[in-house]
Amino acid sequence: MVRWPSSGSLAFALAQASVVCCLVVCTLCLGGAPHWALWPLVVFSALGLGFTAVASMRFRQPLRIRGLAWVIAAVCAVCLVQLIPLPARILDVLSPAAAELREFALVPLGFSPAGALSQDPPATWRELAKHLGYLALYVSTAQLLRLRSRRLWPLVLVASAGILVAIIGLGHLLAGGHSLFGLYEFTASSPVLTPFGNPNHLAAFLTIAASCAMGVALEKRKRSKSWPWALGYLVIGTVLILSLSRSGIVFFVVSQALLAALVWKWREPEAASRARAAPIFWVLVGVLLVGCAGAYLALDSLEGEWKSVSSVEEVRSSKVRLWPMFWNAARAFPLTGMGRGAFEAAFTRYQVEGTAATYTHPENLILQWTAECGLAVTLILAGAAIFLLYRAIRSGRKDIASCVVIAALFGLVLHDLFDFSLELPATALAVVILLPLLGGSRESGDAEGTRSTPSVGRHAGSKVALAAAAAILAAGCVATWKGSSTLAGDEQTLSDWVRSGMSPDEVTKRALPLIERHPSDYLLYGILASAWSTAADPRQALAFANRALFLRPIDPDAHLSAGRALLRMGKRSQAMLEYRLGAEAAGSRVFAESVAQARSVEELIALTPDDPDQMIVVANRAWSIGKRDLAMGLLSHGRQRFEGDARAARLWTVAVRYSLMEGDPAGALELAKSAVKLAPDNPDCILAEAQALSAAGQRDAAIQTLQEGIQKHRGEFELSLALAENLHAAGRVSEARAQLHRVEPLSQTARDRGRLFAMLGRFYRAEGKLNKALEQFESSARLQPELAEYRFAMAQILEQLHRPGEAIRLVREGVQLQKRESEENRAWLERLLRQQAEVEKLRRQPDWTMEPGPGSSEEVEGL
C-alpha cells in the first residue's frame, strides 16, 4: 500500500469537501434556482479544482481533461460567442432575428445596430457561470476518482443529498409547515415542502438519489452497512411518490427497471446464479416497498393526478400541444440560437396563444437546447456527448456504480423530455458528479493511487490546472456579477420609477441601460408605453407599445396603451381594433376600459371579439355602465351574426332579460320564442320563455312551459326553482312547497341551498309568517356569508318585527360586505336609528311593555 504525503491527503480531503459543499449548498439554496446561488457553485467548484490540482502534484499524477469535460468546455465557448458584440452584417448572417430586433426596437432609441447574439445577455452570463462550475466540478471529480480507487463516494454523496432533501420534506409534512424552515414561502403550493419548489424537479433529483442509494446498498458487503442505505432508498422513493409528479413517478420506475436489468447483465460471469439474482431481487423489492409506502400515504391524491391524464386527448392538451409553438421559436434561430438561458425573454415574440402565462422553459430537453444554442450547434454537442458516453461505457468498468449512473441518466433524460430539471443547478451537479464513474478504467493503474515517476510534464499539467482553477474562479465571479441583473428585477425597478412620479423623459433615459441589458424584454417597452400614455405626445406611447407588441403580439397591456394613444390622436377605428386585439388576448380584463370608450354600436362591435360569449360579457359591461342602447345593439348584431347557431342561444336569453328590465314583456316574449325555436332543448331558453310569459301576465302558460321543460330535463335546478316561484305567485301554495320538496335533493352546492332557503323565506314573508321567513334567511346567510342580500332581507323582516337594534347591525354588515354605502341604505339606516331611539325612550318609561309584532306567534309547518 502506498503512503501518501500528509499534505496531499489534506489537499485531497479539501477537494472532496469542496465537491460536497458545492452539491449540498446548492441543493439547500432552493435547488440552485435563485441567481445568487451561483456564487457558492462557482466558488466551491473552483476551490475543488484548485485543491485537486494540488493533490495531483503531491501524488505526482497528471491532471487530464478527458471525455465529457470537452463537451462542457464547448458549451462554455458557445456562451462566450453568444455574448460577443458582433458587427451588424455578421449578426444579420448568423442571427437574422436578432438583427431585426435591433433594427426595429433599439436603433431608433440610439443604440448601435451591432450587438450580441444572445437575446438576454445577463441570462447567458449566468449560464456561462454555471457551466464553468460544472466543468471545474467534472474535472475535479474525475481526477479524484483516478487518485484513489474509491468509486462509491460520488454515489454516497448524491444519495446523502437525496436523503437530506427527503427528510426535510417529511419533516415539514409532519409539522404541517407552509414555508421552508419557516423562512421562505413558495408562490405555488407543493404536496411536499422541500428546497425544490417544483414537484417535477424534486422527483427528478430524487430519481438520481434513489438510484445512488440502491447502488451503495448493493455494493456494501455487510448487511449491517447496507441496510441504512436501503432504508434511505425507501425514504427517498416515498417522498418522490408524495411529490405527485406523474412523469417523475413513471420515469423513476423506468430507471429502476433499467438498473435491475443492467445489474443482472453485468454481474461477474463466474458468480453463482443465486448471487447474480440477489441484486436484482433487492432492486425489485425496493421498488415494491416504495410503491406500497407511497400508495398508503397518498393514494387519493395519486388517483386524482392520474385521472387528469386518463385519455390521449388530455395528454395532447397538456405540455405536448405547446411543442409546435416552441419549435417555431427555435426555427427562428437555426445557427447560433437565441442565447443560452434567454428563452424566457426571447420566446414571447413567438407566443401565439392568447394566454397571460409566460414560459421560462419549453420543458423539453431537445427544444431547450435547439432554441438556445441553435440546431446546428445542438447537433454537434449532442453527437459529441453521445459518442463520448458510448465510448466511456464500452471501455469503462461494468460494475454496479456504472449501472447506477446509466440508469439514473436514462431516467433523467426521459423525464426532461417533459420538464427542465437539468436547467436546475442541483440536478445538473448531481449528474456532473456521477458521470466520471463511467470513465473508470478496467485496470487498476493510476486509479489505484500508485505513485508514478515524477516528470516535468505531469507537474506542468497540474500547475496549468491550478491556474485554470484561479481563472475559472475569476471568470465565474465576473459572469455571476454580470448576470445578477434579472428580468423581474429590472422590470420592478422601472415600474418603481414610473410610480414615483418621474417625467416620461426622465424614466426613458433611466430605462435605456435596462433595455440594453434585456433587449427582448417586452415588458420594459410596455411599461414605458404606459408611462407615455398620459403625456402630451401620444406618439411616444404608440412607438413603445409597437415595440412591446413586436416582442409579444398577444400582450393586452400594450394593446391598451396603443388604443389610448390612438384615441388621443383621433384615430378611433384603429383604437377600437387595438382594444379588440387586447380582448382576444386577455378576455374581459380589457373591457373595463374599452367599453367605456365606445360611443356607438359600431364602435362597440368593432372592439368586441367575434365570439358569442365575449359579446355577452361586453353587453353586460355596457349595460352596467348605463350604455343600454349600445348593449342591445351589440346583442342584435350578435343574433344576426350567429343566426341559426344553437351554441349562441345565450345572445337571445340575455336580450330577454334586458327587455324585461326595460319593461318590454312583449319584446321579451318574441325574443324568447325565437330562442326556443333556435334551441328547443336548451334549459336557459325554456327558462327565458317562462320568465317572459310570466311578465306578460300569462302565468298559467309559464307554469305549463316550465313543467314541460322539467319533463325533458329532470333534475334541472333552475327550472324547478322557477316553477316553484310561479306556482306560489299563482296562489298554489301547497304545490309550490311540494315543488321545493322535490328540488331540495338537487341542491348540491352551498349556493343552491342558500337560494332554496331564500325562496322559502320569501314565500313565508309573503304569507305574513315573518319568524319562519327569518329562520330561512338565516340559513341562507350561514351557507353564503359573503352575500349582503340575505342580511338586508333579514333586516327588513326584523324591522317589521319592531326589532330595530338587530336590523341596524345586519344593515351595517351588509354595507360592509358591499364595500359601499348607497343613498337608499343610508336613509334606511337613519330610519332604523330613529326607531331605535324611540324604543329606548319608551323603555325608560316605568309602565313600558313591548307589543308583539306581526307574525310573532303564528304556528306554521316547516318545509
Image (spheres, rainbow, N blue to C red):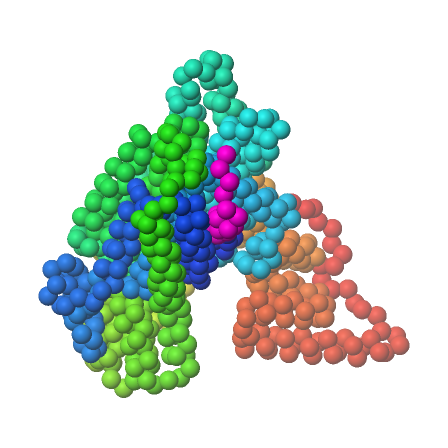
Q: Residue at x 53, y 38 (%)?
A: 236
Picture layout, residue 681 above or below residue 545: above
Q: Is residue 264 magenta?
A: no
In the image, is residue 158 above or below residue 768? Answer: above
Residue 643 horizontal side relative to residue 58, left or right: left
In magenta segment, residue 13: yes
Q: Position of residue 164 (x, y in %)?
A: 56, 45
Asked whether residue 717 appears in the rendered view, the answer is no
Residue drawn at the location 43% of the way across and 35% of the way down: 448
Check the image and report above or below for 713 versus 188. above
743 with respect to 176 (left or right): left
User: Furthest residue to the top?
Assistant: 273
Q: In which quarter of the view is residue 551 placed? A: bottom left
What span is colored magenta in the figure?
1-19
Q: Is residue 538 left or right of residue 291?
A: left
Q: Is residue 141 above or below residue 610?
A: above
Q: Position of residue 402 (x, y in %)?
A: 40, 32
Q: Nearer the viewer, residue 127 or 679?
A: 127
The residue lying toward the viewer, choosing from 338 and 627, is: 338
Q: Is residue 153 visible?
A: yes
How many numbered discs, if any?
Answer: 0
Quarter of the image with the C terminus is top right
| Residue 603 % position (x, y) | 24, 69
Name the side, left or right, on which 778 lies relative to 361: right
Q: Residue at the location (40% across, 46% down)?
A: 60
Pinpoint residue 321: horizontal percent, then vertical percent.
29, 44
Please name the predominant secondary structure of the magenta segment in the image.
helix
Q: Nearer the viewer, residue 604 or 465?
A: 465
Seen at 34% across and 57% down, the residue is: 468
In which quadrant of the rendered view does residue 95 lie?
bottom left
